[in-house]
Amino acid sequence: MPTPSHLKNPLYFDFRAARRVPESHAWPGLHDHPVVDGGAPGPDAVPVVDLREAPAAAVDRVARAAEQWGAFLLTGHGVPAALLARVEEQVARLFALPAADKMRAVRGPGDACGYGSPPISSFFSKCMWSEGYTFSPAPASLRRDLRKLWPKAGQDYNTFCDVMEEFHKQMRALADKLLELFLKALGLTDDQVSSVEAERRIAETMTATMHLNWYPRCPDPRRALGLIAHTDSGFFTFVLQSLVPGLQLFRHAPDRWVAVPAVPGAFVVNVGDLFHILTNGRFHSVYHRAVVNRDLDRISLGYFLGPPPHAEVAPLREAVPPGRSPAYRAVTWPEYMGVRKKAFTTGASALKMVAATAEAEAQAELPSTATIISSR
Ligand SMILES: C=C1C[C@]23C[C@@]1(O)CC[C@H]2[C@@]12CCC[C@@](C)(C(=O)O1)[C@H]2[C@@H]3C(=O)O
Ligand SMILES: O=C(O)CCC(=O)C(=O)O
Ligand SMILES: [Fe+2]
């Protein structure tokens, strides 16, 4: 029988056919640090924030988790379990499409959206054991972009778009709720959250991007890596990991990877670099990675929140201690991505590259809240 044409496509690595992990996908140094169980009670237990708790208690938990971990499990969030199950089913359907269909939507160089390895993969010579698909869930772009995968539209296309639209509606509302909690966790009053210009603007202009991950089962999971260690670049991310765990968070002193338990119905919330900047480093972005599994495929979904591309992000006035200068200069998201690209190629830290220098600090005036997140 002739080989189907999509399997001959040199751009498509057929994970299903792989009987071993080739050198191109074998990562050195994966086991430099021990892995501990973040689901067991004790100091490595991943913090949990349950939104059914009294608001003051939830604010307190968010503050501690964001300061000490940069991540937490979010439960009691109100997004129905039945919807999450439908989302996961649709994500699995998308990745099960024939390779030729997926390749039609392939991400071009510099494209924000599309099919294939995530943008970060371009900084590494080794390939990751995963496929990804990035899209904007905003109604205006969702149906247009998805036509690349389902050009004839039809039932599968409609179901996928309907489910993602409903998910986006619920997630965007949850993001607003969580942003409010984060701001209160920073010490802002109800009044400041709702009436200070900078804070209001963040809520009003925050954008969402969705990135779906498929980690096929792997014949030699100790040699392969699902997603390279990174910090998310935006404000914060909701990660939905299916029943198969794989997400690990990095913790210092002693250096170790904490395996996040797969808690049905829970989201993992990651603090991103722009939130680190916005909070003047009080909430720190979490370094994390995804590992693969010998027997089971794994899917995950990241719902990324961040500013619109033209908005400058700088430390909020309320996050900078009295008498001190902001620790970071103002950056837009695309500008920060550029800095991060440079940081990857030089081995530097992107956050350090946007830190206010000692000289700038001496001269810097604390920006008024009205200019903290402003249009260029
Ligand atoms: C909004 C975004 C965050 C992201 C880049 C993107 O434009 C869409 C994909 C996201 C993702 C997912 C996998 C890891 C990551 C580092 C990557 O390469 O693509 C993140 C990006 C990020 O947080 O910077
Ligand atoms: O697969 C996961 O659990 C993590 C995904 C992730 O970190 C991302 O998409 O940025
Ligand atoms: Fe991530």
Image (cartoon, rainbow, N blue to C red):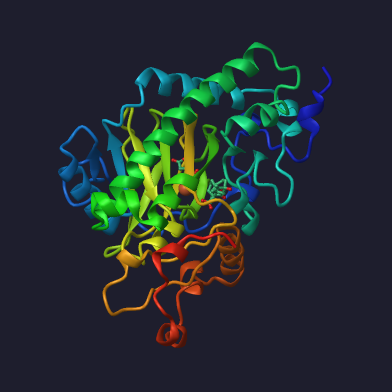
Side of 81 relative to 309 (left or right): left
Specify whether 344 is left or right of 1.
left
The answer to whether 316 is drawn above or below residue 301 in the figure is: below
Relative to 328, is 1 above or below?
above
Quadrant position of residue 279: bottom left
Q: Quadrant of the N terminus?
A: top right
Furthest-right residue in view?
Answer: 2
Q: Of 101 and 197, which appears nearest the observer?
A: 197
Q: Position of residue 254 (x, y in %)?
A: 27, 63
Quarter location, residue 375: bottom right
Count of labels shown?
0
Q: Is residue 286 visible?
A: no
- Relative height, residue 70 to residue 367 (above, below): above
Asked if residue 127 can be seen in this view, the reply is yes
- Counting from the top left corner in percent of width and height, residue 309 is at 59, 54
Indicate the position of residue 41 as horizontal and vertical percent values.
17, 43
Residue at the image point whose x is 66% and y is 23% from the top:
97
Say whether residue 316 is left or right of residue 87. Answer: left
- Quadrant occupied by the C terminus: bottom right
**Foreground residue among 152 and 22:** 152
Is 321 in front, or is 284? 321
| Residue 274 screen position, x and y as percent | 46, 58
Q: Tell me the residue at 52%/57% (across/down).
A: 28
- What residue lies at 35% left-to-right and 66% top-to-bottom? 281
Q: What residue lies at 65% left-to-right and 33% top-to-bottom?
A: 141
